[in-house]
Image (cartoon, rainbow, N blue to C red):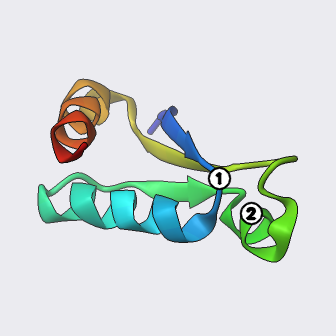
């Protein structure tokens, strides 16, 4: 399964909230680099929210509605 990045976040907490929003809609998502962001290095390597390529459009739409 190929994963694509749909958004980056300055810290893992914000990224986790977005991941939970997707999970509530039945979309599996994972965070990459979240551990680095949580120790204060988010400016160097932000937390990246990744979803399966097949869910990219729906995930983007769900996150846009949450704004």
Q: CA distance from mark 1 to mark 2?
A: 7 Å
Density class for disc 1 (Cα within 10 Å; few <14, some 14-19, many ≥20) is: some
Q: Observer-nearest residue: 35 or 65? A: 65
Where does residue 7 sit, x and y in percent of width and height?
Answer: 49, 37
Q: Quadrant of the C terminus?
A: top left
Q: Quadrant of residue 17?
A: bottom left
Kindly identify which residue carries mark 1. Answer: 10
Question: With 23 as the anchor, is 24 left or right in this view?
Answer: left
Which is closer to the viewer, label 1 or label 2? Answer: 1
Question: With 59 as the anchor, is 36 left or right in this view?
Answer: right
Density class for disc 2 (Cα within 10 Å; few <14, some 14-19, many ≥20) is: many
Numbered-mark total: 2
Q: Are marks 1 and 2 in contact (CB under 8 Å)?
A: yes
Kindly identify which residue carries mark 2. Answer: 37
Q: Quadrant of the N terminus?
A: top left
Where does residue 54 sit, x and y in percent of width and height?
Answer: 28, 29
Where does residue 50 sit, x and y in percent of width and height?
Answer: 49, 44
Q: Is residue 26 above or below residue 39?
A: above
Please give the name of the residue rendered at 30% of the width and 67% of the height, measured from the top-left corner: 20
Helix or strand or loop: what does disc 2 sit on?
helix
Q: In the displayed image of the protein, which residue is found farthest to the front?
A: 67
Please give the name of the residue rendered at 23% of the width and 52% of the height, measured from the top-left corner: 27
Please give the name of the residue rendered at 24% of the width and 34% of the height, measured from the top-left corner: 64
Q: In the displayed image of the protein, which residue is found farthest to the top?
A: 57
Q: Observer-nearest residue: 18 or 26? A: 18
Q: Is residue 1 above or below residue 29?
A: above
Disc ID at residue 58: none
């Amino acid at each position: 399964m190929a994963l694509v990045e749909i958004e980056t976040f300055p810290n893992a907490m914000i990224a986790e909230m977005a991941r939970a929003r997707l999970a509530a809609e039945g979309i599996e998502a994972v965070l990459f680099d979240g551990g680095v962001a949580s120790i204060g290095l988010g400016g160097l390597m932000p937390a990246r929210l990744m979803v399966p390529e097949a869910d990219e459009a729906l995930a983007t739409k769900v996150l846009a509605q949450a704004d």
